[in-house]
Image: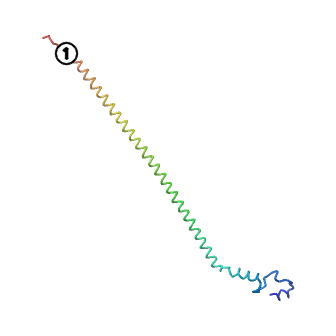
Amino acid sequence: FTDLCKALGFQMPEKYVITPDDQNPEWQKAQQQQGSKKDPLVQAEEVKAQAGLQKAQIDAQTKQGEIQAKAQADMQQEQVRSANDVAIEREKIAAQMELERYKAQLQADTQLAIERMRLEFKAAQPMPQMGVQ
């Protein structure tokens, strides 16, 4: 390589490329870097595997978010249902109390009417006269 560069008129071929010499530290460094490079197919498979792993993580996070959202919605729905049940029970109790008040008032009014009729009936009866025959 050096001879070829000199024949072409280049004064310092090392300026453009590293001379392949096992004693040259730059050559050793370049060889180590070259040797540490992986096969492009292996690198492609590693990238695919990494992408698959990231997709699986994203899918798992999405699924977890969906589960949490459903659990929260279910909990809110149960709270609403429970609140509705309590409200319905209160309405039933209020209606029952109103019915009992109505029954008591009706009973009192009925007793009062019966007593009034009894007194009116008694007043309308002729009084027996005691000494007249």
User: How are the residues colored?
Assistant: rainbow
- Residue 8: name its quadrant: bottom right
Q: In the figure, is residue 120 to the left or right of 33?
A: left
On the image, the x and y values in percent for residue 4 come to 82, 88
Residue 99 against residue 125 in the figure, above or below: below
Please name the amino acid that badge 1 sits on: Met
Sort mark 1 into few (<14), some (14-19) or many (20+) by Cα contacts within 10 Å. Answer: few
Of helix, strand and loop, which one carries label 1?
loop
Q: What percent of the width, then of the height, locates residue 29?
A: 73, 80
Q: Residue furthest top?
A: 132
Quadrant of the drawing holding the C terminus: top left
Q: Which residue is drawn at 42% across and 45% down?
A: 86
| Residue 7, placed above or below residue 129 | below
Q: Residue at x 85, y 87 (%)?
A: 6
Vertical arrangement, residue 82 with respect to residue 28, above or below: above
> Would residue 34 appear left or right of 74 to someone viewing this image?
right
Image position, residue 44 (x, y; %): 63, 76
How many discs appear? 1
Identify the residue at image location x=33%, y=32%. Answer: 104
Q: At x 69% / y 82%, what residue is drawn?
A: 35
Q: Which residue has dot 1 on it? A: 127
**Residue 128 position within the rendered picture, expressed as x and y whole percent measured from the top left:** 17, 15
